Image: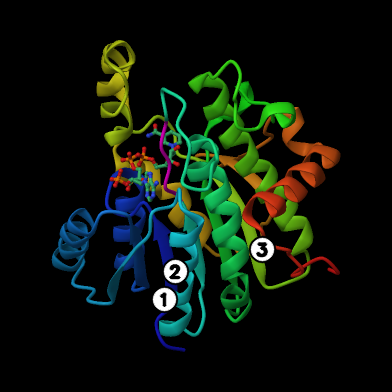
């Protein structure tokens, strides 16, 4: 078989850059999804230079925009026959309430709904892989989260702590639900907490938060270390048949009680279909 293909979102920086580089070292064709062309080009050139792998492709998408995600999918489908590994990695925090062009609260749009939409639209290509993998970067912080069904866009009482926790929890619930729907198929779905990792994420914090995290930052892991569990889930024989699990670094771990609630998962899936305008069918009869 020709080179295996992976997509990494948020591949120009931090953990995403390290995932892309690590997969390039393992001879994958790496599709780097970035929103900024210049930053993406520079990251791509650095990966080619340091790994010698020239099969590195840059594709541009703004993940807060469903239209932009759909354009990326069209471009990917036109160019690639199949997909072996999808890393849903991109993420951002929003310290004041902002809405996406689709009218959705930005934390939910970028971190979770983009993951839901992109993954579902890429499933047909993942089905063509002998062993497809969907791996999502999440965080221990999900334990503080609930799904605010009564006000998913936080029109009232906006709190970056609550929206951040909600988005992380939603990605874990989605991981479990998709794994159930894809049971007995060639596609495995998992998520991992990378640890506390020194990335641009801390530099984008408001001043007071930056000072607080700054004290601990010297003890944080490097992005390369942060990416290691993702690369392990994508490529190790040991993890080959594992699906529907949450890993804290390399350790399979139970996530919050709410993340296993089937009624919440069903409600979130239906809401996500409504908010993205897709009707999912793949995996429902498995
Ligand atoms: N660092 C940690 O300690 C830690 C802990 C737990 C979980 N995580 C998770 O790890 C993931 C990666 O974060 P990181 O720490 O590596 O941070 P980072 O260095 O800030 O990287 C985030 C990446 O996501 C991209 N991104 C953000 N908003 C986007 C959008 N609207 N459209 C397209 N791309 C977008 C960024 O692009 P730009 O460069 O253009 O902004 C960047 O490439 C996130 O999901 C984060 O929640 C991190």
Sort mark 3 into few (<14), some (14-19) or many (20+) by Cα contacts within 10 Å. Answer: some
- Magenta region: 89-93
Name the front one of labels 1 and 3.
1
**Mark 3 lies on residue:** 241
Figure disc tally = 3
Relative to 32, does residue 220 appear above or below in the rendering? above
- The quarter of the image holding the C terminus is bottom right
| Mark in the foreground, 2 or 3 | 2
Residue 208 picture location, percent across and down: 30, 10
Q: Position of residue 240 (x, y in %)?
A: 60, 64
Task: State the SS at label 1.
Answer: helix
Secondary-structure class at tag 2: helix
Indicate if the residue with disc 3 has its beta carbon within 8 Å of ligand 1.
Answer: no
The 10 Å Cα crowd at callout 1, few under 14, some 14 to 19, many 20 or more, is few
| Residue closest to the eye, 272 or 168 | 272
Mark 2 in CB contact with mark 1 (< 8 angstroms): yes
Q: Nearer the viewer, mark 2 or mark 1?
A: 2
198 shown above or below 64? above
Query: Furthest residue to the bottom?
Result: 1
* Left or right, 135 with reference to 185: left
187 in relation to 243, above or below: below
Please tell me in which quarter of the rendered image ligand 1 is found.
Answer: top left
Query: In the rendering, which numbered label is found on residue 75?
Result: 1
Numbered tag placed on residue 71 in the rendering: 2
Q: What whole-number distance in Å separates the C-alpha atoms at marks 1 and 3? A: 30 Å
Q: Which secondary structure type mostly characterizes the magenta part of the structure?
A: loop
């Amino acid at each position: 078989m020709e080179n295996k293909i992976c997509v990494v979102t948020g591949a120009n920086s931090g953990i995403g850059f390290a995932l892309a580089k690590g997969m390039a070292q393992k001879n994958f064709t790496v599709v780097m999804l970035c929103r900024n062309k210049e930053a993406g080009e520079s990251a791509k050139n650095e990966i080619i230079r340091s790994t010698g792998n020239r099969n590195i492709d840059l594709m541009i998408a703004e993940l807060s925009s469903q239209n932009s995600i759909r354009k990326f999918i069209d471009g990917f489908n036109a160019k690639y026959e199949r997909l072996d590994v999808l890393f849903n990695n991109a993420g951002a925090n929003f310290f004041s309430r902002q809405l996406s062009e689709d009218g959705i609260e930005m934390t939910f749009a970028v971190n979770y709904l983009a993951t839901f939409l992109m993954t579902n639209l890429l499933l047909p290509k993942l089905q063509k892989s002998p062993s497809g993998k969907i791996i999502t970067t999440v965080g221990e912080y999900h334990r503080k989260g609930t799904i605010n069904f009564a006000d998913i866009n936080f029109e009232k009482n906006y709190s970056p702590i609550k929206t951040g926790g909600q988005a992380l929890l939603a990605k874990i619930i989605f991981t479990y639900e998709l794994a159930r729907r894809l049971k007995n198929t060639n596609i495995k779905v998992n998520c991992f907490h990378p640890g506390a990792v020194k990335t641009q994420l801390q530099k984008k914090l408001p001043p007071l938060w930056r000072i607080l995290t700054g004290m601990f930052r010297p003890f944080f892991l490097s992005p390369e270390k942060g990416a290691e569990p993702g690369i392990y889930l994508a490529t190790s024989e040991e993890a080959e048949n594992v699906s529907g699990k949450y890993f804290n670094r390399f350790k399979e771990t139970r996530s919050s009680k709410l993340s296993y609630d089937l009624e919440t998962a069903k409600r979130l899936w239906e809401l996500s279909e409504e908010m993205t305008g897709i009707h999912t069918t793949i995996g429902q009869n498995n």
